[in-house]
Amino acid sequence: MTIALEPMTPGHGARIKGVDIRAPMDAATVGEIRAALAEHAVCVIGHDTPPTDEQHIAFSGLLGPMERGAGAQLSGPNGRVPRPEIIDQGNMDELGEIYADDDRRLAYKRANRLWHTDMSFYDNRATFSALVGHAVPPSDADTQFIDMREVWDALPESRKAGLEDLVVSHSFWHSRVLGGGPEPTEAERAKNPPAKHRMVHLHEPSGRKSLYIASHAFAIDGWPPDEARGLIEELMAFATRPRFVFAHQWRLGDVLIWDNLATMHRATPFDDRVFKRDMRRTTMRERAEASGNSRVA
Ligand SMILES: [Fe+2]
């Protein structure tokens, strides 16, 4: 055993000690990190200085096939982070300045304050996300999580009945508009169409069942729209009870890794017109893609 685990918060998540993602890593250590993720779903590895983009990408490749963006559509043509593997989750433009108030990119990024799971709007879903803190606001910029396996286990048996047969549609644009962003154009909608997934799935690394919904979810196959919305809202209200919610408080150089197939997460509000937040994310997928996908959150 080369790594050691401490609880990230009482009862949830794990802080992984004894490993540095900036250095080459042997297969046994990668296996231990995977085992920690299978059990805890959210893990953090601290560093005294942030890993470079290249080190971030090299480590991410050990966790599975990586998303590669087709273009920097939300970061502008001269993206601040020009690596196709890295999604820019900060609030800064190409010159390193905080976005203007009316910048469309800022409005869309605020949708990340809704409970969501990354890339559920793709057929080929996100497995792990690995987010590196390059500039961390002084307070109020936590990332909160909910373990959806725990939520599933806690649902009354009477409520679980029938849910495993349901198929849910997930749309990137649904959550952008729900989060206060502008309506997308028809061309944008066509570029990122919805995807369908089972409402309940087996989380293979842990062998536990997990609920798979969140803010991209907007419809259920065969259900009238208002009834589908009602059930999704009811389950979201149950899942977001305070007993299930835990938070990571960021430190510069943290690498936060979570399993999107077992969790929901959200960014908490901070003064994004005063403080710079530079967070960069890689995303692993269920399967390798022959070509890139759109660069969206
Ligand atoms: Fe996210």
Image: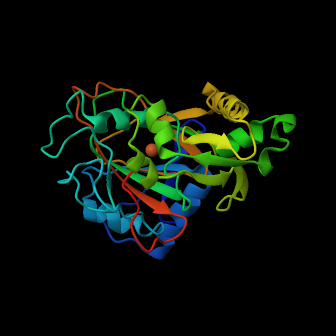
Residue 39 position by quadrant = bottom right
Residue 204's x, y, as percent? 67, 62
The residue shown at (58%, 61%) is 35
Looking at the image, residue 253 sits to the left or right of residue 208; the answer is left
Residue 46's x, y, as percent? 36, 49
Q: How many dots with numbers?
A: 0
- Residue 297: in sight, yes or no? no
Residue 217's x, y, as percent? 59, 41
The residue shown at (38%, 57%) is 294
| 247 lies above or below 127 | above
Front in this rendered view, residue 26 or 158: 158
Front in this rendered view, residue 251 or 156: 156
| 113 lies above or below 35 | above
Q: How is the image coloured?
A: rainbow
| Residue placed furthest toward the front | 186
| Residue placed furthest toward the left | 95
Q: In which quarter of the image is ligand 1?
A: top left
Front in this rendered view, residue 208 or 75: 75
Looking at the image, residue 206 sits to the left or right of residue 22; the answer is right
Residue 256's x, y, as percent? 42, 49
Front in this rendered view, residue 64 or 230: 230
The residue shown at (39%, 66%) is 292
- Residue 109: in sight, yes or no? yes
